[in-house]
Each structure stands twice: as C-alpha cells, then as structure tokens.
Image (spheres, helix red, strand yellow):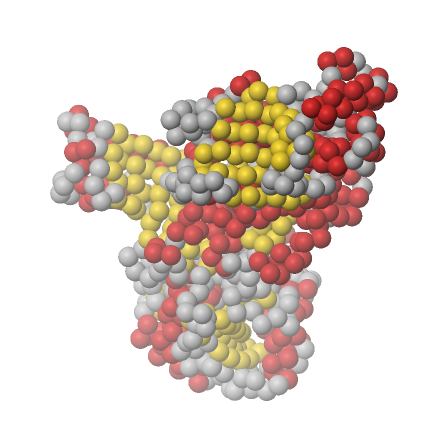
Amino acid sequence: MQILKFGGKSLANGEGLRTVLSIITGKVGQRQPIAVVVSARDKATDQLEAMLEKASQGGDISADFQAFKEYQTAGEDIDFSEEFSILQKIFDGVFLLGNYNDKIKDNTLAQGEVLSAKFITHLLTKQGIKAEFVDSRHFYTTDSFFGNAQLIEDTSRRNTIQYFTQISSEVVPIVTGFIAANVHGQTTTLGRNGSNYSASLLANFLDAEELQNYTHVDGIFTANPELVPDAKIIQQLSFEEANELANFGTSILHAKTIIPLLEKKIPLRILNTFKAQEQGTLICEEGTSTGGIRAISVLEDYALVILEGRGLLGKVGVDARIFRSLADAKISVSIISQGSSERGIGFLVANKEAQKAKQALEKEFETDVYNQDVSKVRVVEDVGVISIVGQNLADFDKPYNALIRNQITPLLINNSATGKNVSVVIYKKDLPKAVNVIHGEIFEISKRINLAIFGRGTVGNTLIEQIFEARTDILKRRNINLQIIAIASSKELLFNHRGITPKQYAFFTEQAHPYAFNQFITLVQQHHLENLIAIDVTASKTFVEHYLSLVKNGFDLVSANKIANTIDYTFYKKLRETLAQYKKQYLYETNVGAGLPLIDTIKLLHHSGENITRIKGIFSGTLSFLFNTYSASNAPFSQILQRAIDSGYTEPDPREDLCGNDVGRKLLILARELDLENEFSEVSIENLIPETLRSGSREEFLSRLQEFDPIYQKIKDNAPKGTVLRYVGDLHGDLSQTQTAHLNVQLVSVPENSALGQVKGADSIFEIYTESYGENPIVIQGAGAGAAVTARGVFGDILRIIGNK
Ligand code: ASP
Ligand code: MG
C-alpha cells in the first residue's frame, strides 16, 4: 500500500484540488492500493485560529466565518452542518468568556481536517470512486497535552490496524491528518504541520511500501531557493540526514515525521503537486552517494545574549542558574556557546524575548554583579543563524574564510555535539549575502565573481570585450561565473546586479544613468553582492579617492591607473593598511610594463629575501619607439615624432610622454615595491621637451615640432661612436642601508650591442640586478604598451585575485 499525503496548499480550490483528484483517480485506475491523509484545506488552520483569537477579544467574526464556510463548501452540495455548528458554538462561547484554552483550540482547528477529508471523499464519490471518510480520532490515541499531544503508540497501532481491517480493499480511505483524541475521547492535535507525522504513523502501522508527501515545493533543497538562487534539489537523502535537516527548521519535515518511517524503512517521497513530472526528493535508507548531504538552513529573528564576567571562571552551577532563570521566565534557548575560558556564555533567544531574558538574568545574577563576578549581560539584537547540516567543523575553514573575505564576521560559531553540523550566528542584515557565500563554497557551484569596471577608454573597452569573450570558457574550465555588474564612466553608470550582457552594454548610452559614487555603493549593498572586484581603468587623478571606500565595502582592487601608487607615501601606506585590515588584495601589474610580469617578479624576489640592488630599463613604449627609430635613421627628430603621433603611440598631447613624468611614476612604483619610501618629488627627471614648447596649447605645440630637431641632432652628434640614444629609468643606491633610493630618468647613450641598445620597436626592457645574480641581471623584455596588452594584463590581475580566493 502507498500512503498519499496532501498539504493544505495542494488542496486549495482550483488547480490544486483538481490535480489532487486526478492523482488519486490515477492511482485507483492503476489498481494501486492507497490510503490518503489530508491537511486542512488552504489556510483553514490559520483562519480558524485567527477567528478564535478575534472572538476571544470580543471581535465580530461573522463575516470571516461566512467567508470560511463558503470557501470550504466551494459551491458543492455537501452537508457540513455538524462541523459548522461545532465551530459556531465554540466561537459564541469564547466570545462570551473572552478566553479559550488549548483544549478548545484543538477542537476548533480539528474541524479544518474533518472538513477537508469529508470534502475530498465527497468529490471522489461524485466521480464514481469508492472513497470513505476516516476520522483519525477513532484510532490515534494521545496524552492530554493539547496543542502538541504525544501519541500513545501501542494503543494507537492496535486500534489503527483493527480499524483498517474493516475497510474493504476496494475503498480509498480519506484520513484526517493532524488530529487525534485522548483516552477520554477529547480532540487533541499533534502540533503544527502534524499531518506529516499522521501520515508517517499510518505508513508505519499499515506497513506501507511508500509514503508520498504532496506539497507545493519541489522537494528538499540545499538551501531555501528564495534566498539562494543557486540552491539545488537534493534527490536522495538517508533517514538520518533528513532527521538532521528536520531539526534545523526544514519546515516540510516535522521533527517527528522521520522516526516512524525509519523504524520500518519506509521510503518517503516529497513531491510537488503542481509539477507532476518531477521526481522530488526521496528519503530512504541510502543517502547521497557522496557520503553525507550538506544543506543549509536559515533561522531569523534571534537575539544573542551574552553573560560576561571573570568570576564565572570555574564556578559551579552558573549554567544551571542561567537556564533555570530563563526557564522560569518561559524563554526557550537555542544555540549555546561557552568559551573554553568560561569567561563568558552566549546563547540565542527569540528576538522578542531578548529584553525579558536580560532582565531575568540580571535579577538572577544581581549579587554576582555586585561582587563583580559578572560584569554585564549584553544583548545583540537582530541576529540570524545559518546552520550547515552535514558539515564538519574541521572542513569549515573554506566557507569561514569566504565569509571573512566578504566582510561578514560571525558573532558565534557552534558545532553540535551530535551529528555533523555547524551553526554560524551573524547579524540578520548579513544573512542573504552570507547564505549565498556559504552555499557557493560548500557546493562548489560556479563561484560568482562580481566585477565593477570604472573607465571607458580604450583599455576599459578592450577589457570588457575580452571578458565577454572569455566568460563561457572560464565558467567551463574553472567553474567561475564572471559577471560585470557595473560599468562606469566618470559621470554615468550602467548597473545590473545579475550581470551586464554584451547586448545591454552595446546600448550603454541609453541604459546608463548619471550617478554619484555613493549611489553605486548603495546598489552593491542592496543586492548583497559577494566576491567583488573593482577595476580602475580610468586615467583619473581623482578616482583614487574612492579606493578606501571600495576596500571597506568588500572590493578587491585591480588598477591600470598609476595615481594611487604615486601620490604621497602616506596615502600609499594608508591604502595598504586598509587592505590588510579588510583582507583585500590590490593588483596593478599593468602600472609598469603593461602586460609584462614585472611587478609580480619584483615582489617575488623581494619577498623571498633576494636583495635587489638596481633596476634599470626603458620604461616607456612610446619613448622606446621614438629613440630606437631616431637612433637608427637619418631622418630629423620631428619627423619620427610625427610618425609616433600618427601611429597612435603617444598620448593625445605628446608632451605627457615627453616630459618624462610617466616614466618617473613607474620608477617610483618599483621603488615602493621594494619598501623604499620615496616621494615623486625625489625622482630626478630629464624633461625631453625644449623649454620654449612646454607651455602653450596642444595645437601650437604640434605645429612647432621642428624646434626639436637642432637640439636632438646635437645630442646625436655628441654621442660616442657605437652608441645609441635611450631614455632610461634607473633605480639605484645603497638600498639595503637607506629608506630611499636614487631615482633618475634621463636620456643616455648606451653601447649599440648592450641589452638596452638592442631593444627594437616599441618594446620595453627591464634589468633587475640582485645580490646573488651579481653582474647578470634578470631581464624582462617585450611589448610594454598598447591597449590590448594592457587590458590583457588587467584581466590577468583579475584572474589572479580570483585564484587566490
Ligand atoms: N493543518 C495543520 C497545520 O496547518 C496541520 C498540517 O497541515 O500539517 O499546521
Ligand atoms: Mg510549511
């Protein structure tokens, strides 16, 4: 025999009811022996409870009751006079008395299940099916703990078996869930959601082969899908695993439901009435093949109460006093945690009882406070609990680290003594983000990385294209879901918390809105976004003002912009301190030598203890091109410069390259990598622009390029034979002894056949001299400029950050 149980929402008028009837008739058609257990229909239980309460407060419930009757009858020709008159009498009495007890309440709520079972019986009979209304109060016997009665098992089993032997095998019994009777025949109930328990008891007593629980959900999920969009259905669970879940608030499993099934190894299938084709979740003897499920449950609306004091150390009976005083105040305590030092005890109570708990404890510990054994009772309101069922504390470091990286610091961590599960108490406001972060970590569902890109210049645009192109591949190969949630120019922002699509980006102008930076931060917070990386591909001198705020709001940083690393050293240090404090990373490989792995190499050498003694090289691709070409040809300087301009090698105003400041900045960045505290003003830079051309408009400058020619011709003529001109950055000095280095940027002549002399095209070259390599520097050479290589380099930094996560 199969037991079919239908929940209230499945039995609601309309689609639910129709589907339930067709499920039952379908089974009957297949000659499958079944018994059906039903809940009250739709919201009947809640409505009955509400009417009872309203009546007790002297309210007029006639309209509510009328609506209730109409809904339950649903236009059918069915006789509910008995149930309606019981209810009418109760409501009248309670109205007069202004009060009711649990016994009256049970009798009231019970009518919901009676009406439901009678109604289904009626409809089936109308369709020519032999169905029989079965009132479970005839055979489920309980104690007299109204509202949550305990079953007397032996009696109930015997009575049930006997009752059902009298029902012919052709008849479908439609049994009331939830309700029972005490030995005096008075109505009791098995606790809210108790119909599930009723059904598993019936399955046990009648030795059913399977219990099918039809609900309005698809099954048991790895987490509440309303909170975690990535949550997945768990296809199969063992009884023990299901029991763990039930204890942690998975609401479709009554805490007692599993035991009767476990006892006889009867499989339970949780199905969605409204999705007949789906398999749902099967709970049976074998669990998940992977050795234990893991699922996450979330409880809200708690407060953390902490009793602190040095005098608690080693004192006997403190815990007992805490729990006795709370029990006396009828406050139930959930998670408890005690530091091993016994200096403080923390535990959770319902939010609304927090102040009451505090008062109870303050009263209980009044003299201890006076003696200074207890320093204070503290309450942290609005906390929530995330429980990870099936989680070993030993393997909790990954999800834990992920929380910290996402700016969520647990207030308390607790692992249960029995079973495998870890509970984390955090502020309620952090729950949505935290549960997604943990879920992503433990189920290794593609990790979602949220990128915000600032700057829509050539590098920015190229980067965005590269990301769009590489996304699918990264998802497939590395299981990383790279989303661009924001693209911003200096004035406008395009934001999509689900990820901007290439199509949406194509319409940037139409879709973007003017914004202030704070609005961007607010958006990120509103959507509880995790794993954030901000990318600065602007050339802005002011955007760096937002770096600290980005870090504090959970962003790692990637930057192609040199400003943050070259403004005053105080800021440089402050930024690094903030990064360390918030455990965030900041990568800027493209600041020097575009995509070449220069900074990374220097960092590695420096941090591994290798003494770097000098760094020398051609730092600017533009100036590299200029002097490589000029040295090798007889054309005048202005002509070569014009060619560089026309090929797009220079900044719009070439003076920005020629003044040497950019090279100076790069040199400074490298110096600071070596923990040297130089300022930009200390870099000695040879300006390549003749004094007469330094001021004035760009247009004017561009029209007077010939003025370069005599100067550079002279330099070329004066250079020794066999040498070429190179614009070289040089970092040197007694680096192990001082806090600063000598930083020079100048035009020099170097031997044609030296490393620097052989550089071609627009290549950059860097020579890193170290103590152990002596006279043979480590040389890094290659394309050191250009939007595509820079964008690649930025992308590389992004991937590196993700890799470290
Ligand atoms: N009708 C009862 C309730 O809503 C029992 C049940 O549906 O399981 O709690
Ligand atoms: Mg529910």
Depth check, front residue: 724 or 247:
724
Who's the residue at 56% across and 69% down the image?
A: 280
Residue 159, quarter of the rendered image: bottom left
Depth check, front residue: 650 or 343:
650
Q: Is residue 645 left or right of residue 684?
A: right
Q: Is residue 414 visible?
A: yes
Who's the residue at 62% across and 25% down the image?
A: 746
Q: Is residue 770 left or right of residue 715?
A: left
Q: Is residue 509 left or right of residue 672?
A: right
Q: Position of residue 35 (x, y in %)?
A: 52, 77
Residue 233, quarter of the rendered image: bottom right
| Vertical placement of residue 701 versus 331, above or below | above
Q: Residue furthest front?
A: 721
Q: Is residue 66 visible?
A: no
Who's the residue at 42% across and 75% down the image?
A: 286
Q: Position of residue 215 (x, y in %)?
A: 56, 64
Q: Is residue 713 left or right of residue 295?
A: right
| Vertical placement of residue 573 versus 215, above or below | above
Who's the residue at 52% across and 34% down the image?
A: 615
| Vertical placement of residue 527 versus 658, above or below | below
